[in-house]
Amino acid sequence: MSSLDHPAVTQVVAKLRAAGQHRAADGVQVLPDDVRTAAKAAAAVGVPVGAIANSLIFRAHAGGVDFPLLVLTSGAHRADTGRLRALVDAESIRKADPEFVRAHTGQSIGGVAPVGHPTPVRTLVDATLADYALIWAAAGHPKTVYPTTYAELCTLTGGTAANVAAVEENAAP
């Protein structure tokens, strides 16, 4: 089975088409190797690492309930869990384990797309991604990516634009 035929990738492509994002759907690329890191994805596509939208799933806890939080962050920096906790008014935030990720997205770590999940996932979109005219995001499998824009990511996911990086990463040099 080709990576394009993978059920998670087909679901992502269907969601992109349904949202009218045909350029993104038609632009899904299958890479020769897994690109589970932003650096590997950037090298494979030939773009700066900051133009990679890392899809990070966190397990947030608020009001006695755990819920998934998808953070689409620039590959150029790390998300600050303290900042994320404040942004979503959660009592705690921690990195999700593979089972939690698959249960809430239907996808595996390293290939989580911004869409194509069984139910909508609360999403924060890193504001620094707006610095890039074209962004590359995972397409549901660790070997697949697709081109998109910051505006398309925000619209498609219903995500909230936010500054998600650690404070020291945002400081001027």
Image (spheres, grey):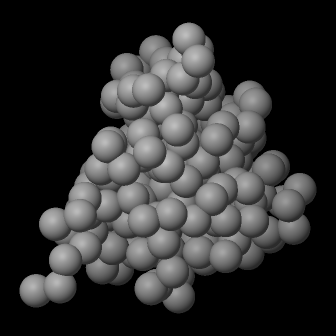
Relative placement, left or right, of 156 versus 162 is right
Please provide percent x and percent y for residue 27. Answer: 64, 70
Residue lying at the far left in this picture: please name it: 173
Asked if residue 87 is positioned above or below residue 76 in the image, the reply reads above
Between residues 118 and 28, which one lies in front from this camera angle?
A: 118
Quarter placement of the N terminus: top right
Instruction: Tell me which residue sits at (16%, 66%) in the image.
Output: 168
Between residues 93 and 111, which one lies in front from this camera angle?
A: 93
Instruction: Tell me which residue sits at (56%, 11%) in the image.
Output: 64
Asked if residue 124 is positioned above or below residue 110 in the image, the reply reads below
Asked if residue 34 is positioned above or below residue 158 in the image, the reply reads above
Please provide percent x and percent y for residue 87. Answer: 50, 49
Q: Is residue 104 visible?
A: yes
Q: Is residue 27 visible?
A: no
Between residues 44 and 104, which one lies in front from this camera angle?
A: 104
Instruction: Tell me which residue sits at (53%, 88%) in the image.
Output: 133
Please provide percent x and percent y for residue 76. Answer: 27, 68
- The image quarter in which residue 47 lies: bottom left
Asked if residue 41 is positioned above or below residue 140 in the image, the reply reads below
Quarter placement of the C terminus: bottom left
Please provide percent x and percent y for residue 62. Answer: 54, 23
Relative placement, left or right, of 64 versus 35 is right
Relative placement, left or right, of 85 versus 81 is right
Between residues 128 and 111, which one lies in front from this camera angle?
A: 128
Instruction: Tell me which residue sits at (44%, 45%) in the image.
Output: 86
